[in-house]
Image (cartoon, rainbow, N blue to C red):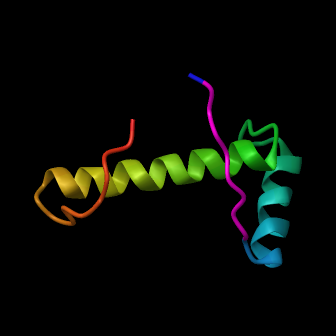
Amino acid sequence: MVAKYVNVGLPIEMIKNIDRVVKSRKFGYKSRSEFVKEAVRRSLEKYMDIKVMGKHDHLINVG
C-alpha cells in the first residue's frame, strides 16, 4: 500500500526546536519528518489507549 501525505503547518519556533533535536543526533532522528511522524504516532497511541478505556469514542482507529 502506498502512503499518501498531506502538509501540516507548525509554528516556526517549534520547527527550530525540532531541527535542533534532529541536528544533535542524540535521539536517532535523521530528519524533521521522522521526528514529527514519531511524535504524532506516540500521541495517537496515547489517545487510542484512552479510547480503549471508554473515553473519547469519537476518535478514529489508526493502524
| Residue 25, image quadrant | top right
Measuring from the top left, give residue 35's x and y in whole percent. Answer: 69, 48
Q: Is 28 inside the magenta-drawn segment? A: no
State the predominant SS element of the stretch in magenta: loop
Between 1 and 62, which is closer to the camera in this rendering?
A: 1
Instruction: Say whether residue 10 is left or right of residue 63.
Output: right
Vertical arrangement, residue 32 with respect to residue 29, above or below: below
Relative height, residue 41 to residue 10 (above, below): above
**Which residue is pictured at 73% across the width and 70% down the height?**
9
> Is residue 52 or residue 9 the one in the foreground?
9
Q: Residue furthest right?
A: 23
Q: How many marks?
A: 0
What quarter of the picture does the N terminus occupy? top right
Q: Position of residue 47 (x, y in %)?
A: 33, 57
Left or right of 52, for residue 22: right
- Residue 28 in percent (x, y) is at 74, 36
Give the farthest residue toward the left: 54
Residue 5: which quarter of the image? top right
Residue nearer the viewer, 32 or 9: 9
Q: Position of residue 63 (x, y in %)?
A: 39, 35
Side of 45 relative to 54 (left or right): right
Vertically, is 3 above or below 37? above
Q: Residue at x 89, y 49 (%)?
A: 23
Residue bounds of the magenta highlight? 2-9
Q: Residue at x 79, y 54 (%)?
A: 21
Asked if residue 19 lies left or right of residue 57, the reply is: right
Q: Residue at x 59, y 45 (%)?
A: 38
